[in-house]
Image (tube, rainbow, N blue to C red):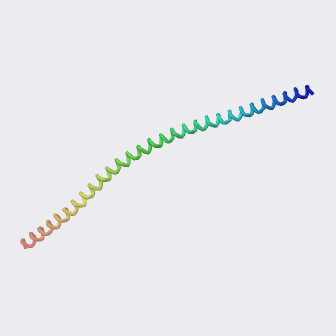
Amino acid sequence: MLMQQGTFNFIKEDSQLDNMQMLEAKITKVIDKIRAQSEENSALNERISSLQQELDNKEDEIKALKGELKGIDSLKTDVDRLNIERETVRSHVENLIRELESVEM
């Protein structure tokens, strides 16, 4: 009976050792997953930073283009005003030419 009890203790110790090894394996897996997630998180943060910089650059470009567009709109307004003025002058010149032609005859 003593021998059986000793064998039981040996089996019990083996079982505890197996449980400890399984627990250690699980902990190692968890640590590896945490490490992988941390690396992925770092990579994603770098990508976010890169995209944020790209967005800032694009916003600066948009501001510059809006400024150019305002300048173009101003030039278009000036051209329209000058075309109207040219038509008015042309009309006056045509009238003056007609008056001169009628005086000569």
The location of residue 5, given as percent across then percent down, is 88, 28
Q: Residue furthest right?
A: 1
Counting from the top left corner in percent of width and height, residue 43 is at 54, 38
Rendering coords of residue 52 (x, y %): 45, 43
Task: Work out which quarter of the rendered image holds the C terminus and state it.
Answer: bottom left
Snapshot quadrant of residue 28:
top right
40 or 91: which is nearer to us? 40
Q: Residue at x 32, y 50 (%)?
A: 68
| Direction from residue 11 to residue 68 in the image, left or right | left
Q: Quadrant of the N terminus?
A: top right
Q: In this rendering, would 4 be left or right of 18?
A: right
As drawn, 2 above or below 27: above
Q: Is residue 6 left or right of residue 18?
A: right
Residue found at x 68% / y 35% = 29
Image location (x, y in percent) of residue 74: 26, 55
Q: Residue at x 49, y 42 (%)?
A: 48
Considering only vertical position in the picture, is 69 above or below 88?
A: above
Please tell me which residue lies in front, 55 or 86. 55
Residue 65 vertical placement versus 14 (above, below):
below
